[in-house]
Amino acid sequence: MLSLLNPDSLIILQALFKNKKNNWNKIQILKKETLILAEKIKRTGLYNYLKQEKIKIIEKEGGIYSNLIIGASCDLIKKEIYLFLDSLNLLKKKIDFLNFQELKELFIAHEAFHFLKKNKSNFYDEIGAHLFSQNILKLDFYPGILDLIYILN
Ligand SMILES: [Zn+2]
């Protein structure tokens, strides 16, 4: 049906499967740093943190393009997180282990991490954002796999 992954996920999967020790060690360090950040935000509360930082959550239609599907994105300057409802609805149809609210929260937590790190496109930050949202929502799976679910079927 739909045919493409978020290109960031491909890079992450490449790093993980290439079995490069250096990459792996960096990911372990990142994991520790990310868990410390996640604990801090869990104490504050995700939505309290967003409120404190005056970060707005904006729901939009769309997110589905011919070669790309985006569930959420953010603008660090405007302090806005965008949730793309068409894309999230599509994802929700394919999974039953999260309800729609949890799914939204997963994407919000992911984007919140980019605000915490003040960096949107760094390769390791993308892994960090997934680990962060995994921890915030106490998921027993790495949320990066949701990108793969888009291409199933
Ligand atoms: Zn991201």
Image (cartoon, helix red, strand yellow):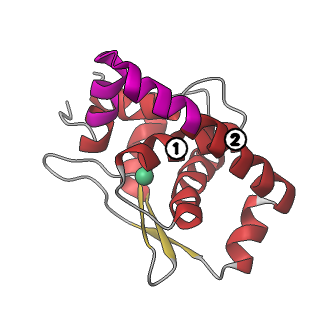
At x 19%, y 53%, the residue is 65
Counting from the top left corner in percent of width and height, residue 99 is at: 63, 39
Q: Quadrant of residue 93?
A: top left
Q: Tag on residue 35?
A: 2
Mark 2 C-beta to ligand 1 under 8 Å = no
At x 26%, y 52%, the residue is 64
Check the image and report above or below for 76 versus 61. Answer: below
Q: Nearer the viewer, residue 60 or 35?
A: 35
Give the CA distance from mark 1 to mark 2: 9 Å
Mark 1 C-beta to ligand 1 under 8 Å = no
Tell me the residue that label 1 is attached to: 128
The question of residue 96 being in magenta is answered with no
Secondary element at tag 1 = helix
Q: Main secondary structure of the magenta part?
A: helix
Residue type indicated by callout 2: Leu
Give the magenta range.
11-29
- List the single residue furthest toward the left: 66
